[in-house]
């Protein structure tokens, strides 16, 4: 079976920097939220926002690799590598949310309030 | 301006609205709903990039599972609107603007060198479950096992954290 060179998806006339700029803007929004918000649950949501921005960037680079001068096989491997990174980021994000929200619940049960400014027990 | 570019710009606007809603809305429930919007739009962008499998898992894992977890916690903790930071130097608008502009500037520096890259001629099976499954069971078999261990540890940890006395 010969591999057809037909590209999938419909991205061919969207420039790469649009995707990258969107990823950068979403990441910056998430970073601002992590710094600014006081509610730990909202801070977690902002972390998810940042992870998703990174996923978008990974997939963009998986799709747009014409210009690296890669051979066809290497380009296919690079495309798969980008997608696999997204899969693992999703797995890590799921584990992180489960443990992190569990910790927030434990803090809430112990102290009846959750606020990132008041949680300074671990600071010496 | 082609149809694809208009579609991309519309999706990007929606994604930014969702992201801004997460950061700027005062109520956690609204933030969660904005995050769902952002996840769904990002899934559409993954479809646009030809990664169907990841678009579907984005909807299932993020918009399905993770957001349900978030909403459960928001519901159980009865969180109302939050006050601004108590420390005087963390004035949110100032810190947010400066920090966000800095992060965006650093990323913008990184975008310029790769701006000539074009969509490559990829395999027609690029984003299908078949291709991802093949890759996961061959090249990435070992990281796949590590990820499964990580998820197992996460399950055990959340069960232990849910006990009455830690």
Image (cartoon, rainbow, N blue to C red):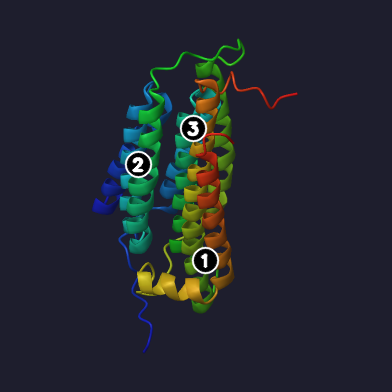
Q: Which residue is mark 3?
A: A105
Q: How far apart in space, not on screen, are marks 2 and 1 (Cα)?
A: 29 Å
Disc 1 is placed on an element classified as helix
Q: Is label 2 on the same chain as label 1?
A: no
- Taking depth in this image into account, of B46 and A5 the one nearest to the observer is B46
Seen in the picture, residue A6 relative to A10 is either above or below; the reply is below
What residue is pinned by disc 2? B68
CB atoms of marks 2 and 1 within 8 Å? no
Closest to the camera, between mark 2 and mark 1, is 2
**Disc 3 + disc 2, Cβ < 8 Å:** no
Identify the residue shown where x is 43% and y is 70%.
B132
Q: Secondary structure at mark 2?
A: helix
Residue at image mark 1:
A81
Q: Residues within 10 Å of mark 1 (few under 14, many from 20)?
A: many
Labels 3, 1: one chain: yes
Q: Earlier in the sequence, mark 3 or mark 1?
A: 1
Mark 3 or 2, which is nearer the eye?
A: 3
Of residue A51 and residue A23, the one placed in the foreground of this image is A51
Taking depth in this image into account, of A35 and B117 the one nearest to the observer is A35
Up the image or down, B74 lies above or below B37; here it is: above
Q: Report the chain holding disc 3.
A: A
Give the image location of residue A46, x and y in percent.
Answer: 47, 35
Chain letter of the residue carrying label 2: B
**Does residue A82 show up?**
yes
- Which residue is found at the position 39% from the left and 41% from the top? B69
Find residue A124 and name its label: none
Q: Can residue A61 be seen here?
A: no
Distance of label 3 from label 2 (alpha carbons): 15 Å
- Seen as rendered, the residue at the extreme front is B165
């Amino acid at each position: 079976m010969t591999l057809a060179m037909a590209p999938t998806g419909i991205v061919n006339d969207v420039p790469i920097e649009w995707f990258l700029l969107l990823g950068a803007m979403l990441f910056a929004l998430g970073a601002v939220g992590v710094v600014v918000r006081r509610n730990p649950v909202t801070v977690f949501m902002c972390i998810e926002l940042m992870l998703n921005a990174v996923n978008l960037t990974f997939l963009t680079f998986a799709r747009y690799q014409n210009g690296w001068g890669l051979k066809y096989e290497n380009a296919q491997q690079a495309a798969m590598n980008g997608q696999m990174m997204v899969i693992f980021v999703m797995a890590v994000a799921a584990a992180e949310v489960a443990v992190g929200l569990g910790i927030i619940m434990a803090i809430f049960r112990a102290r009846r309030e959750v606020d990132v400014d008041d949680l300074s027990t671990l600071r010496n | 301006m082609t149809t694809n570019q208009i579609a991309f710009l519309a999706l990007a606007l929606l994604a930014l609205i969702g992201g801004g809603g997460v950061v700027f809305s005062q109520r956690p429930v609204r933030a969660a709903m904005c995050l769902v919007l952002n996840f769904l739009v990002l899934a559409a962008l993954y479809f646009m990039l030809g990664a169907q499998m990841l678009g579907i898992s984005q909807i299932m894992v993020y918009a399905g599972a993770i957001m349900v977890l978030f909403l459960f916690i928001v519901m159980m903790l009865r969180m109302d609107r939050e006050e601004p930071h108590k420390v005087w130097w963390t004035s949110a608008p100032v810190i947010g603007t400066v920090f966000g502009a800095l992060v965006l500037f650093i990323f913008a520096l990184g975008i310029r060198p790769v701006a000539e890259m074009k969509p490559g001629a990829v395999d027609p099976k690029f984003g299908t479950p078949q291709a991802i499954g093949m890759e996961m069971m061959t090249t990435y078999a070992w990281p796949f096992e590590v990820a499964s261990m990580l998820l197992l540890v996460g399950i055990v940890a959340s069960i232990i954290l849910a006990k009455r006395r830690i």
